[in-house]
Every structure is written in structure tokens, then in C-alpha cells.
Amino acid sequence: MNNVIGCTTRPLHKLSFAAACKHIADAGYTDVAVFANEGKAPVRSDSTGEEIAATRQAAEDAGLKPSMLLGRTQLNLGLDAAVEDYCKLIDNAAELGAVWLLDCGTSKEEHFDDYFELMRQAAVHAGRKGVVITLKPHGGISLTSKDILKAKERVNQEAFGICYDPGNIIHYSKGEERPEDSVEEVAPAVYTAIIKDCVVVDGKPNVQITPGEGLVDFEKVIGALVKSGFSGPFYVECVRGDKTEEIIKNIRATHQFVSDILAGL
């Protein structure tokens, strides 16, 4: 079984991207998902070649593959401009060396139809560039498992799929949907997966916990994904901790946690 376990820079977002990469590599990960660090995304649609090269080099210097990039749509600009902007983001993701472009959809209903058209057009461009767009559960257009499946069907492009995030299934539904109940249905359309847990206390969801401490049954979720033929990549997005030392300890523990589950399948 050739499962890739990566880590996003989100847990270490207060540090520089280079420092985050070093800690992620030291914790045993092979891949990094490029999120924002120090309040700024290192690679964006308007990034310069120098910025992209520096980001890629920082990851490689730490011994990591920058295989996923967190993106965003600009549907407020209008459909044509949004497509142009997103295609620039795809170009930059390819230059970074990212295979996966992670998208969070949109929460504005007036943008739903444009979002699907944007993804249809962008996915064609992504396919030419060797990049795959994956939509994660994030409320709005991707609130539930049925919503992300609907998005996959409506876009209907090879280079557009699902990033399964079990913690967000609980978070955005406030516990009304559980990932264990829907993962088998979604699994055939899953291209990437996020390792994130969630608790709901007095109706308030919280994902800032270490996987294994919350409501997600990771053995069932990961087991169902693997049974369907999914072999990664998995990316850790959240762990508990305010101080760098605690965060590092928990991302290391989460790598072991996921590795043990995969080894037992």
C-alpha cells in the first residue's frame, strides 16, 4: 500500500513557510500542502516567478514535496475574470510542483451556478497542466456529502474531484451529519483526503483538536476510503496546541496515528 501522508502548513501558520516545512519534515511527513504562513499565502494567482521558485525551494530544502496548494475563487470579479484568475492560479500551482489544487467552494448562493461553470472551464486547463482540482466540504455549495457529490457530477471533468474532510463534515453540519455514514458513498469520487477531527460542545463545533480526540472514527473513515481503492494522499490540517512545541508534538503524533491505522488495514 503506497499511501502518502502529508501535512498542511496550517498548524504552523504563525511561522515562516520555510520554518514550517522543516518541522513538518522532522515529524516524518514527505509532502506539504501550501497554506498561508505569517498571514500570507506563499503562492497565489498573482505570485511572481521568484515567489513561486522560493516556495518550491524552501519545501525541497526541507525534503518535502509541495504537492498541494490551497486556492480560492474570485467570483466577485464576474465569471470571465474569475476563470482567468483561476487559470493563473493553476499555472502557478503547476510551476510550484503541486499536483493538487484544493478548493473550498463558495458560500454565496448567487455564485453557485457561476462556480460550477468556473470549475468546468478551469478543470480543462488544469488537466493540460497536470493539476487536479479537489473540492472539500466547507459549507455553502459544499456543505454535505451529497453537495460535494453533486458538484462532482455537475462539473463532470476528469481534473475535478473531491477532497474528503471528515472533520468539516461534522463542523459545518454542527454534528448533524457524520462522516462514517456517508464516506462509502463518496469514496469512489475522492482524490485526496484531509485528516481533521471535530468536537461539538453546546452546539459549537471546534476543529482545533488533535485527530483521535474528537467525534471522527478515523479507522472507519480511512478504512472505507482504502477499501474503495483510495491510496492517498492524506494531509493533516489541524492539531491541538497554541505553542510551537505542543503543535510539533501533535503533528508528529498524528503522523504515527494515521500510519498505524493504515498499517492495520
Image: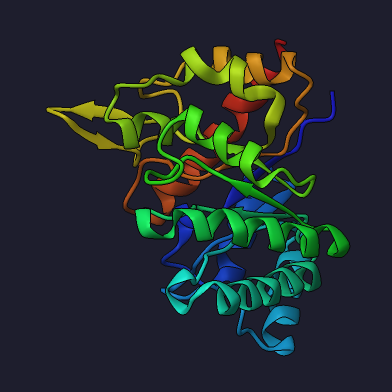
Q: Quadrant of the C terminus?
A: top right
Where is 208 relative to 78, above or below? above
Relative horizontal placement of residue 204, taking residue 236 as reference (left or right): left
Report the front residue among 217 and 107: 107
Report the front residue among 23 and 233: 233
Where residue 131 sits, quadrant-wise, is bottom right
**Residue at 57% in and 52% down:** 8
Report the front residue among 99 and 114: 114
Residue 108, percent across and down? Answer: 35, 57
Where residue 18 sits, quadrant-wise, is bottom right
Residue 6, percent across and down? Answer: 66, 44
Where is 79 relative to 136, above or below? below
**Would residue 194 be visible to someone looking at this image?**
no
How many labels, in total?
A: 0
Where residue 197 sits, quadrant-wise, is top left
Relative horizontal placement of residue 246, taking residue 48 as reference (left or right): left
Where is 174 relative to 244, above or below? above
**Would residue 88 be visible to someone looking at this image?**
yes
Residue 52, percent across and down? Answer: 71, 79
Residue 49, percent across and down? Answer: 74, 87
Q: Quadrant of the N terminus?
A: top right
Report the front residue among 247 and 108: 108
